[in-house]
Image (tube, rainbow, N blue to C red):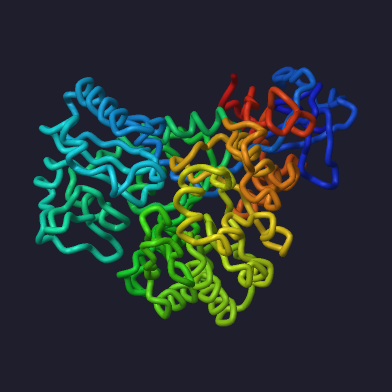
Amino acid sequence: MKPPADVILVNADIRTMDPAVPRATALAVRDGRICALDTTGDLSALHGDATRIVDVEGRPVLPGFQDTHIHLQDSGREYALSVRFDEAELLAEIQDTLRDFAARHPEHEWIRGGGWNAGIFGEHNLDRRVLDAAVPDRPVFLRDSNGHSAVINSRACDLLGLDAATPDPVNGRFVRAPDGTPSGMLHEDALDWARARMPTTPDRDFAEGVRWAQRQCNAHGITGVLDASVAERHQRVYRALDSAGELTLRVCATAKVLPEETTAGALARIEALRRDYCSPTFRIHSAKFFVDGIIENRTAAMIEDYSDELGGNAALMFDEAHLRELFIAFDAARFQIHVHVIGDRAARAAFDALAAAREANGAWPSLHQLAHLQCIDPADIPRFGELGVVANMQPLWARNEPSVTDIAVPMVGPRRARWIYAFKSMIEAGAPYALSSDWGVSTLNPFQIIQTAICRQAPHRGRDHPPFFPEERLDLAAAVRGYTVNAAAAAWRGQDTGSLSPGKLADLIVLDRDIFAIDPYEIGETKVLLTLLGGREVYRA
């Protein structure tokens, strides 16, 4: 006789994402794993005195979603403990929000925050003087929604030692007036220059950020993530939370490699992070490379120069020979390689380096990933399938919004604009793929992201808003796979998660509606009613 189950879901509409048993009406969990599925709803043989029966009243059940490109710890701290500008559309709104936050938090030595829209604000209208008018007496550091630019006030410039004589850091830029005076706007690694000179944020603040962020994830049906750029502090905070049993997500992470590091030095440092701690809930298994920046601040690397009046281009952030050497070394050491690419030149350089790694080391199931893929040359699209490289997509950005239509499209011109976020073309060419959010750059709500993937229109705009290249729309089944089985594989968790199959971990969600049966323009309103991690309840509406 089989031992009784710990939990049994009954009266359920279960989509397992397992082609062997695609649908079921009941599911049993023992010791954190699925021990039985049933299509008739009868698992009475597994009932015991301590078995918890959960009647989901006919509602849909799916595997827990996994977000394979998210900045959980850093964005969690920012949302939990700093000032946010996600809704600001006017400079006056930034000033009012900043002034109010400073008044309510006199204990903050530095005013930190983020989320201002790089499609609305930038070098042309946001500088130290704007911030000085709101908070002149305390230093202010405000990051944009993309994390590639920031603005500081005059007090911060003084404390950091930023003046006309300060040279730009490698892969970074201080925006300046004609006389060389810094405007207060920082781009790319100039942010790191500033943060290195600011007071250190204590680990307890980042731990609180993780707690806040994982609550949001669980409430939106997310049970696994890949934190997309970590270092020693991130590992220290995650390790402490994991050891205390406080993680309600499965966290994998990518450790950032710096362009100035030697190959041997970078490999030794990140191998130590991988070796130092590994548990079923947290581990570092990937190396992260920022090969270029973003279009909004003109740091994306393009094959041809920008097409707008200013023209110009941006260099790759790594020397190409060094990048190939790094990829070969990390691939040989069996790290997954996770690459930030925005411009088509960056994507091509990443493909070339990954091809060199495969030639040197042979093929293995690495599922190396290119993330974002805003611009790609169509000649490079078949290389996903040829090299087995995952297209890590953020479909929420594939819509007619200012950062795309008012900035990106004019900068790359109409010919290249056709290949902005060309996600369906990648999948049809054989690309392995996963969907993700890049939170806190944008929402972490997977249902809004799925709706945008299949409509190519912003969820709040409705069906009458012009879609952004509708020929690149995904179908719903493909989008759900991108958040479940495909995401699990991309995070190297496919053996244990991604589908509701016997033997796999019982990471699952109960929804308030059947997203496969409703109007696609209603998918973004979907609510999660229950989230289980290994059969343990981590969220209930």
Q: Is residue 141 above or below residue 486?
A: above
Is residue 485 visible in this depiction of the protein? no
Dividing the picture into quadrants, the one containing residue 201 is top left
Q: What residue is at 33 percent from the left and 38 percent from the top?
A: 114
- 16 displayed left or right of 353: right
Pick out the residue farthest to the right: 40
Pick out the residue farthest to the front: 309
**Image coordinates for residue 507, horizontal then vertical, percent:** 65, 36
Dividing the picture into quadrants, the one containing residue 131 is top left
Q: Is residue 46 above or below residue 453?
A: above
Is residue 132 visible in this depiction of the protein? yes
**Image coordinates for residue 386, horizontal then vertical, percent:** 68, 72
Q: What residue is at 40 percent from the left and 33 percent from the top?
A: 86
- Pick the front one: 244 or 196: 196
Q: What residue is at 86 percent from the left and 25 percent from the top?
A: 41
**Image coordinates for residue 185, horizontal then vertical, percent:** 24, 49
- Pick the front one: 195 or 361: 195
Q: Which image quarter holds the N terminus?
A: top right
Q: Is residue 284 above or below residue 63?
A: below
Q: Is residue 154 above or below residue 304?
A: above
- Pick the front one: 63 or 340: 340
Q: What residue is at 51 percent from the left and 66 percent from the top?
A: 344
**Image coordinates for residue 291, horizontal then vertical, percent:** 43, 65
Dividing the picture into quadrants, the one containing residue 452 is top right
- 438 displayed left or right of 57: left
